[in-house]
Image (spheres, rainbow, N blue to C red):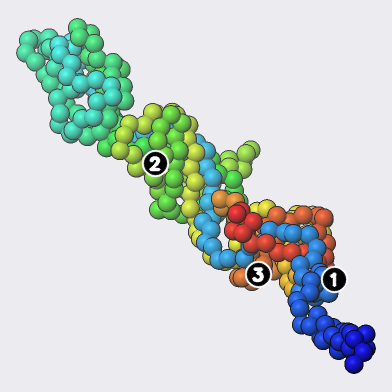
Amino acid sequence: MNPFASLRLSRTLLAPAAAALLTLLPHPTFAADDPDAPKGAAVTVLKAAKSCFNDIVEVSGIVLAREETAVRPERPGLKVAEILADAGDTVTAGQTLARLTLPEGGMQVVQAPVAGLISNSSAVIGAQASGRGEALFSIIARSEFDLIGLVPTADLAKLQVNQPARVKVVGGPEVAGRVRRVAPTVQPDSQLGQVFIALTANQRLLVNSSGRAGITTGQSCGVSVPLTAVLYGSAGTVVQVVRRGRIETRRVAVGLMLNGQVEIKEGLQEGDIVVARAGALLREGDPVRALTAAADAK
């Protein structure tokens, strides 16, 4: 047999086999050939979730004693002989505060008519004490304080007795409080009304110090998103949603806000995929690649 003919025959047989083998080998694919390949800009997204929001009315005011009792001797012509309590002391009802010398000799004691905090004392040993003069002691009855603040008319209607409040007093701690009284009228010039918030404090507060309170008037639970997901414009308030890999612009109605979150009353459903940071560069129908907030943080 002719060796050259044999070689030609082997080549003829190998060519189809090699072609068939090549079709079995994996080959690279391109994004243009893959309809499911990511397209468009990458955006960070999150799911709209349910949250509860407290409706808070903000109040600014000053701290005052709810009830202050003046302590004086019952008769004139007495002199202070001994002082047993001073301003800043907490006393009990019936506790002896001072001893006075009678003109005819002998002693008379001055006692606290109520328990509370002594806010002021004018008692000086040897000084005259009279039932008509300056009070020897002033006692904040039961150590009870109020924050007296002013509220706009629109918010005044939301307030009711016993609503809880958190109060931050300048130079002091944050304390709990409750609405004790709401004024039935407003000031004609400022259209502000008074609210009295009873403070619950385990330590001394400074009378006439300023404070700020947040009164919880109600609660609303619904769908919420971050404030950064909401766009405000001439066309209204919108949120950008990713659906089937494209941007949908939804008009929404917003409600309460708290800690960087905003309540969405209309326009979104729980579980909707929302662009975490909405922007004017994204338009209706734009293709995007959605990255969850957790994955984006990594």
Q: Amino acid at mark 1?
A: Ala
Query: For the residue labelled by badge 1, is the local secondary structure a helix, a strand or a loop?
Result: helix
Q: Which residue is at the front of the view, 281 or 179?
A: 281
Query: For the residue labelled by badge 3, is the local secondary structure a helix, a strand or a loop?
Result: loop
Say if residue 251 shows up in the picture. no
- Report the residue marked by disc 1: 32
Quadrant of the image occupied by residue 121: top left
- Report the residue marked by disc 2: 175
Query: Callout 1: 10 Å neighbours few (<14), some, many (20+)?
Result: few
Q: Most extreme residue toward the bottom, as rendered?
A: 1
Q: Most extreme residue toward the left, as rendered?
A: 106
* Quadrant in which the C terminus is drawn: bottom right
Where in the figure is residue 150, as x and y percent of width and height? 53, 40
Query: Callout 2: 10 Å neighbours few (<14), some, many (20+)?
Result: some
Q: Which residue is at the front of the view, 42 or 92?
A: 42
Cα separation between marks 2 and 1? 63 Å
Where in the figure is residue 207, as x and y percent of width and height? 39, 29
Q: Which mark is residue 272?
A: 3
